[in-house]
Image: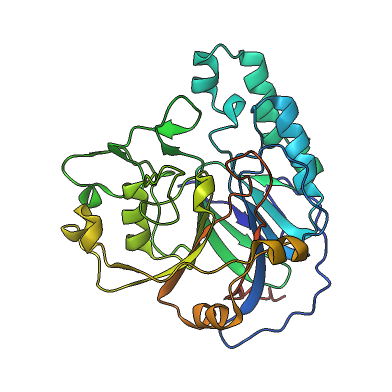
Amino acid sequence: MCTTTQKRSRSESQSPQIPVKRPRSASASGVPIRFLILSDTHGHKLPSNYPECDVVLHCGDLTEDGSPESIASALESLGNIKAELRLAIAGNHEISLDGQYFKSEGGSDKDHSRAVSLVKAEDSEAVKHGVVFLNEGTHSFTLKSGATFRVYTSPYTPQYDSSAFQYPSGEDRFNPPHFTPQWASNTSTADSLIPENIDIVMTHGPPKYLLDSTSDGRSAGCEHLRRAIARVRPRFHCFGHIHGGYGAQRIHYETELSSSSSTNHDVDGIITMTKEWVGKNQAKRKGYASLPPSAAEDFRNSKDQTLMVNAAMENSAGELENAPWIVELDFPVLEIAESGV
């Protein structure tokens, strides 16, 4: 399993960090972390009124054409957001990062290598702008406050038309074999399998029937991903990809999920709550959307709830219409033993 441990908010790339000036106060359940979640910015210039946060999560489609030049520009824009830690994944538009797809469409080895070096090299543009670009897998981070969290990330979405980072809808890459229905094939690997005891799931695409409605009314999410969410029950799952699904919705769970119930979404134990109302104009003025106070308090105190966030910012007309989401949750403090002499 691909696991990245980041202590004191230092990334694998040792990117510079910006201190958060907002006062922090630990609760009995841990230390609060303030996340700013965005997705599907498609190369647009990001507004300057985003609030300061602890962690930025970008769920993919940073660019429109996926070229190395566009990736470099998007990383610079993302780096302007004030945060201690900035995490990003690719989406289906980051075509030059998916070597197999890119070269099958006539892209060159040189441009693919150049794109990868922008996000992975020690002197990359990602490092320069303080962005940690994550591959599919599980990663651990610890902030300066001591708060620690585990996040699973994946850029992959079900195959639709021709694009990068896609898989056939009949393949289950997210679950162990006994959670895969008979009609599908299990293709999970150590990196693609979503593990137990995960705090955050960050994917480019949504799970089935959760904030995944297209403009023509189709449900475009992945049912294998939905089954994985029911199995691991993270604190929140953020994604984008389906622009019309923008918003937030809480879910909770009725029953323990078994391998037999996992083959049918109607009996997977997920109970959906009402989609949260968003005043889009007010959110744009503030620079972010968030749960209403009563819903935020209920979610923060209810460990059996998962918050689903579709943070796709571009609308169907190609305009950057939607505000990013702010989510604040308490996370445990990593205990570091003092070494004696």
Q: Looking at the image, how many numbered discs can be counted on the residues?
A: 0
Please indicate, yes or no, whether residue 153 appears anywhere in the rendered image.
no
Which residue sits furthest bottom?
A: 28
Q: Is residue 224 left or right of residue 6?
A: left
Please indicate, yes or no, whether residue 321 appears anywhere in the rendered image.
yes
Q: Position of residue 59 (x, y in %)?
A: 58, 48
Q: Is residue 88 left or right of residue 308?
A: right
Q: Splitting the image into 4 quarters, where does residue 28 fall?
A: bottom right
Instruction: Please tell me which residue is depicted at 65% across the width and 51% down the height of the picture.
Output: 87
Observer-nearest residue: 337 or 173?
A: 173
Instruction: Please tell me which residue is depicted at 32% across the width and 61% down the height of the picture.
Output: 231
Q: Quadrant of the C terminus?
A: bottom right
Q: Is residue 251 left or right of residue 90?
A: left
Instruction: Please tell me which residue is depicted at 70% across the width and 52% down the height of the picture.
Output: 11
Relative to 279, is 220 above or below?
A: above
Q: Position of residue 9 (x, y in %)?
A: 71, 60
Q: Splitting the image into 4 quarters, where does residue 55 fall?
A: bottom right
Observer-nearest residue: 208 or 6?
A: 208
Q: Position of residue 305 (x, y in %)?
A: 43, 73
Relative to 149, is 295 above or below?
A: below
Instruction: Please tell me which residue is depicted at 53% across the width and 34% down the height of the picture.
Output: 92
Q: Splitting the image into 4 quarters, where does residue 182 fall?
A: top left
Q: Position of residue 167 (x, y in %)?
A: 38, 33
